[in-house]
Image (cartoon, helix red, strand yellow):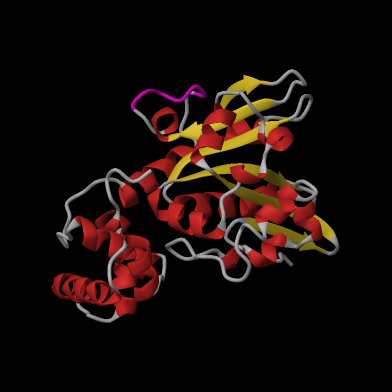
């Protein structure tokens, strides 16, 4: 059975990982021993929203590992100045807090592993990957194919071929304008990642602000309802008193009640996860 079963995908919205942060999870795997530590540390059990491992009868049937990258690191990899598997540094991997924030504000991911044993396994493995990518505010996706390795998975997903390193490693990437823009995809047909970016655009793109939150209310709503920060933590982050945070939350509840049909935090949080653009700042990066 899979360690993270295919039917156990996060439902509808990013599930913030519990337990050790990425600085102790992904960070440890990549900063102390390289990607091989992922398997040794059973990282997918700590961060099931970023990794999927399917074992059946003692055989590995499917594997997905996603690594959240700092925006500057993504841009350097994307340009071919560095390659993630060979050149990734500690500061390239997001901490837990950074990852939790960027799930909503804009996330860059490295698809470190995407493997499957056969056609039936590819369906379950691909289903996890596409489901997960559709639930975060995906800005860019990277993958690598070493020289001599089959590139069909990259092409099937809809990744675009990028720079090639001196050892023959090929970098692949996907971004909204290249994968879901007006121009036709280089493959000349619809690809799975096009649907992902269209879904992300629909959920996180600018739209009519139903709640009409002020900029400070947007930040507080995001931190409280989506990132699950306390009033004290929000006050520290924004440089305001907890009582001021509490007053803003009261105004947010007043605005949300006629739309959401509830003043309860769980009801407002559920609604905002389905309409995240309501509490995102347009200039967030």
Q: What secondary structure is the magenta-colored segment mainly?
A: loop
Q: Tell which of 51 and 234 is nearer to you.
A: 234
Q: Quadrant of residue 215?
A: bottom left
Residue 183: within the magenta?
yes
* Quadrant including the C terminus: top left
Residue 191: within the magenta?
no
Q: Is residue 209 left or right of residue 40?
A: left
* Residue sitting at x 37%, y 62%: 237
Q: Quadrant of residue 6?
A: bottom right
Residue 191 shows in the view: yes
Residue 159 shows in the view: no
* Residue sitting at x 16%, y 72%: 251
* Quadrant including the N terminus: bottom right
Q: Quadrant of residue 49?
A: bottom right
Count of residue discs? 0
Residue 90 picture location, percent across and down: 66, 45
The range drawn in magenta is 182-187
* Residue sitting at x 75%, y 62%: 42
Residue 234 picture location, percent across and down: 35, 68
Residue 178 picture location, percent across and down: 43, 28
Does residue 144 lie above or below 26 as drawn?
above
């Amino acid at each position: 059975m899979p360690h993270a079963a295919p039917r156990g995908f996060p439902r509808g919205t990013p599930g913030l990982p519990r337990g050790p942060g990425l600085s102790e999870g992904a960070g440890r795997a990549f900063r102390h021993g390289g990607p091989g530590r992922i398997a040794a540390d059973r990282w997918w059990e700590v961060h099931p929203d970023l990794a999927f491992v399917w074992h059946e009868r003692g055989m590995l049937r499917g594997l997905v590992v996603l690594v959240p990258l700092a925006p500057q690191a993504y841009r350097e990899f994307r340009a071919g100045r560095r390659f993630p598997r060979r050149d990734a540094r500690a500061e390239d991997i997001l901490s837990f807090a950074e990852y939790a924030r960027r799930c909503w504000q804009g996330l860059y991911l490295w698809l470190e592993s995407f493997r499957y044993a056969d056609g039936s396994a590819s369906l379950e493995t691909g289903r996890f990957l596409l489901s997960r990518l559709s639930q975060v505010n995906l800005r860019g996706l990277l993958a690598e194919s070493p020289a001599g390795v089959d590139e069909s998975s990259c092409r099937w997903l809809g990744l675009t071929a990028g720079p090639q390193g001196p050892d023959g490693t090929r970098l692949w990437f996907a971004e909204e304008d290249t994968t879901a823009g007006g121009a036709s995809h280089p493959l000349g047909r619809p690809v799975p990642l096009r649907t992902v970016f269209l879904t992300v655009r629909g959920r996180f793109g600018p739209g009519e602000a139903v709640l009409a939150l002020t900029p400070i209310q947007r930040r507080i709503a995001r931190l409280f309802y989506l990132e699950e920060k306390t009033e004290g933590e929000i006050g520290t982050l924004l440089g305001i008193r907890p009582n001021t945070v509490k007053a803003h939350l009261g105004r947010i509840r007043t605005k949300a009640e006629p739309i959401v049909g509830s003043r309860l935090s769980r009801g407002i949080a559920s609604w905002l996860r389905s309409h995240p653009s309501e509490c995102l700042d347009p200039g967030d990066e």
